[in-house]
Image (cartoon, coloured by chain):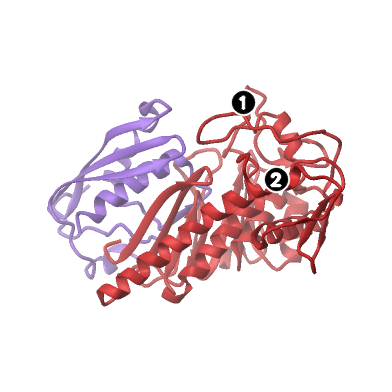
Amino acid sequence: MSESYLRSVAMMGTVVTVQVVGHGASRSDQQEREAAVIRALHWFHEAETRCSRFDPASEVNALCARVGEPVPVSDLLFEAIRFALAVAEETGGTFDPTVGALMEARGFNREYRSGAAVHVATGLGVATYRDVTIDEARRTVTLQTPLVLDLGAVVKGLAIDLAARELEPFHDFAVDAGGDLYLGGCNAAGESWSVGIRNPREREHILATLAVRDAAVCTSGDYERLAPGDSGDHHIIDARAGTSARTVASATVIAPSAMVADALSTAAFVLGPVEGLALLQRHGLEGLLVTPALEQFATAGWHSA
Amino acid sequence: MNSTDPVAPPVAQTTDTAGAPPAADSARQPLLKDGEYYGWGTSRHGDIQAGIEIKGGRITAAWIQQCLTRYSCSWIAALPGQVVARQSPEIDYVSGATQSTNAFYYAVVEALSRAK
């Protein structure tokens, strides 16, 4: 760590840490690194401003207030929606970014900084991802029916990727957004980054350790955010069943990009051990699904990953 | 813990799956300087200030200096002892990490960075 520049801030409801290995030879090299780290962290702020369901002034909430008309949106929001819809299609709607209203109904409606309740839904019909259409050429999004877009499974990964892009010139770096990671190059010891996978039932214990370079590692767990009350509901919704998904306790995915790892860890979590692994294998990704009884289901190449 | 061991593993020391002996690599790492150091860690549950004591190049004590979290500080009371036992956070990063431990972890990391 003595040979790293490291900065941690609270953002997107979590701790975001950016580390660049090495300090640079000259003062101007150092300043260049610091500036890149600040630009990297700024992407999290930008992603939150554009895409957070919890920020009443966010661009996505402004979009949700306009139904039945094509709305031009920023590149960042467009990419997040386009990718979320692709994953929804890929999982037959089990993963669905229009679950926002369901999540509000379950109590996931607090702005995490102030604790203030947020409610943006105007009419809570039974919307699905098919009610959202995009126009690639015009960069517009049209909501066919009132709905609440929840891009939570995509946006953090997208912000990690944008941050990583700022840091690529330095080769060796890490971006950690509350346990969702991108690891570039090597650590300060000149080795692959060592990444522990948290045991979903014992917070101080590590289930597995991976050697990672130039890849993202994201984990969706049922322990992250519990609904108020004692229902045991958590924040990952099975859109087809309308309830919290319960057959998986945590799902970890390694992918070339954090947006893919983030979204597919959520999708695999919702699909369950068998279909979830099939999804990852179909896309040539490695992953580990852990059941509430701590049974482990890994892709064929996981242990050599 | 053997407090006479002259070489402390650095914070970023890895003990990866291959089980490479960490001691073999540690000689090229700088010693921690003796003294008391403090660092802050932040989470959405609140902030934690960690303190560490370095003697003979090793972490001899770690504690929570200030606990500004919304949950009871006793929830994380076991963490400082773990840092002393392990001498460092053993791995670079944890996927699926919890916020409360992160806050203490980053507080220790920051404190350790001042000991270099």
Res B52 quadrant in image? top left
Above or below, A193 against A200 in this view is below
Q: Which of A42 and B53 is in front in this view?
A: A42
Q: In the drawing, what numbered circle is on residue A277? A: none
- Position of A188 compared to B32: left or right? right
Please state which amino acid type lies under the numbered disc 1.
Pro
Q: Which of A59 and A102 is in front in this view?
A: A59
Q: Which of B73 and A304 is in front in this view?
A: B73
Name the image quarter holding the C terminus of chain B: bottom left
Q: Percent x, y for residue A155? A: 62, 53
- Label 1: how many residues lie within 10 Å, few (<14), some (14-19) or many (20+)? few
Secondary element type, mark 1: loop
Please state which amino acid type lies under the numbered disc 2.
Ala
- Label 2: how many residues lie within 10 Å, few (<14), some (14-19) or many (20+)? some
Q: Percent x, y for residue A232? A: 65, 28
Looking at the image, tell me whether mark 2 or mark 1 is earlier in sequence order: 2
Q: Percent x, y for residue A88? A: 79, 54
What chain does badge 2 belong to? A
Q: Colour of chain A?
A: red
Which residue carries the number 2 mark?
A62
Q: Residue at x 36, y 54 (%)?
A: B90
What chain does badge 1 belong to? A
Which mark is nearer the camera, 2 or 1? 2
The chain assigned the colour purple in the figure is B
Q: In the drawing, what numbered circle is on residue A228? A: 1
Q: Percent x, y for residue A71? A: 77, 54
